Amino acid sequence: MSPEGLVAAATVLIGLGLLAWCLRAGRLEKPGDWGEEQEKEEEKGIPFITEDGSGRCRLLCKPSALAQHLVRSLGRSVALRGGHWQLPRWPRLQMLQQLLQQPEEEPAVARELLQLPDAGLVALDWLVGPRGAVGGVGGSSSPVLLLIPNAAGKVTGGLLQLGVRALEQGFVPVIFNRRGHNGCPLTTPRLQPFGDPGDLGEAVTYLRCRHPAAPLLAVSEGSGSGLLLAYLGESGSSSRLAAAACISPIFRGRDWFEAGMPWVYEWPLLLHLKKGLSRYAGSLAEALDVAGLLGSRSLRELEEILFCRTKSRPTSWEDYWERNEPLRDADEAAVPVLCLCSADDPVRGPPAHTLPLELFRSSPYFFLLLTPGGGHCSFPRWGPRRCWGHEAVLEYFRAMAEFLRAEERRKGLPRPRRWGVPTVEPPVFTWRRSYTR
């Protein structure tokens, strides 16, 4: 058997072993395991019932003209009217499937390294089109979609599949890789904290310069949403983004690290991080305890060693989260954000304790699309497009573009961000308050 075959066989055996362990331990939740709290959350918001009655997605948001348009658009969405998966309420199995699955199409990627003011580097991976066209060439007015992986920097098959679907539908997808993540060289003894949006802001500014006539969009996966939410709050109306979406986001970073998470999810990410950081053990030794870092047994311990127990500027766990909580400046966000969440997400935890429902009720920019089943970043279904969540996110971006065009025509406003039509030196995009009233 070839080496590739051995690797594939080992992956299958590991997956079957983990599945058998979950079944023996009784850790595959049955309907109702989340108790009455889940049912109460599902009763709130605007319902979207699928044609076969299997789905009960609900949109929770503050009433506004934008919300009404989004309700109409999502109500017509094929993604929310599709069939159901045979195991809709087994979230740990869905999570395992999401971690092990490979993209249906492996896209070609063209990497671009962006140097930061402190000489650090982040990597932008442009997904290449079917005829070899690279999105990073510039000059196109097609919307640029920035894909943000989870906090461990692991680019999952699901995120790649979302990029492929976006590419097919006319978007220009590009993956943001943090310092030292996913093969990006670590040129300074500093990595990016959980909720520090500085490097992301530099990348967004660069994308605006490369594509001045194109709308900028962003979507994050899992714990990577902490970075996107922090950026939207810190930058406010100067974010340069037209819209954003978060798939299975983590809203409360400190609580998430302290509560712990399923080992089926935590250990692959922990090993992924250690493997990447071990390449720079020599240079990192001057700044932190490398032995403790590589010997850490949880993501929380690794996070503390990386950012709290540094040799030059040690800080407390409490102070660290005062500066890095994703929603610390959520009131300042001025860009529409769709948060696609499942009530049975085993990584985020029970919705009553982990979803900031009051934020969605009070802010005109935050929209919660809550589904009873879907696990963590899975939202599976039968068919060639295995994740209906990807279709819902892309439909949301199309709805935002339609809404802007309609408002601009109605009010006779200039159209600096009309999708698909180039303009000359457009001003920085800013959402108008009247859109969200």
Image (cartoon, rainbow, N blue to C red):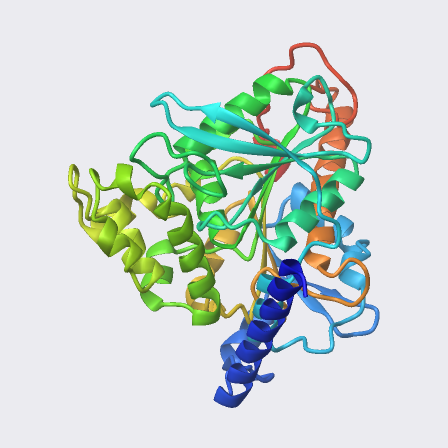
Q: In front: 36, or 218?
A: 218
Using the image as rendered, state which of residue 51 and residue 304 is in the foreground. Answer: 304
Residue occupying image coordinates x 25% and y 49%: 290
Q: Position of residue 318 (x, y in %)?
A: 22, 52
Q: Please, which residue is most extreme toward the top here?
A: 424
Residue 171 figure quarter: top right
Q: Is residue 152 above or below residue 259?
A: above
Would you say residue 349 is visible in this rendering? yes
Q: In which quarter of the image is the N terminus?
A: bottom right
Could you say where residue 206 lies in the image, as x and y percent from the top left? 53, 22
- Judge by depth and name the residue closer to the eye, 361 or 239: 239
Q: From what the image shows, is residue 79 above or below residue 206?
A: below
User: In the picture provided, is 152 more to the left or to the right than 13?
Assistant: left
Q: Residue at x 42, y 47 (%)?
A: 276
Residue found 73% across the figure and 78% down from its top = 86
Residue 332: image location, x then y, percent: 43, 37
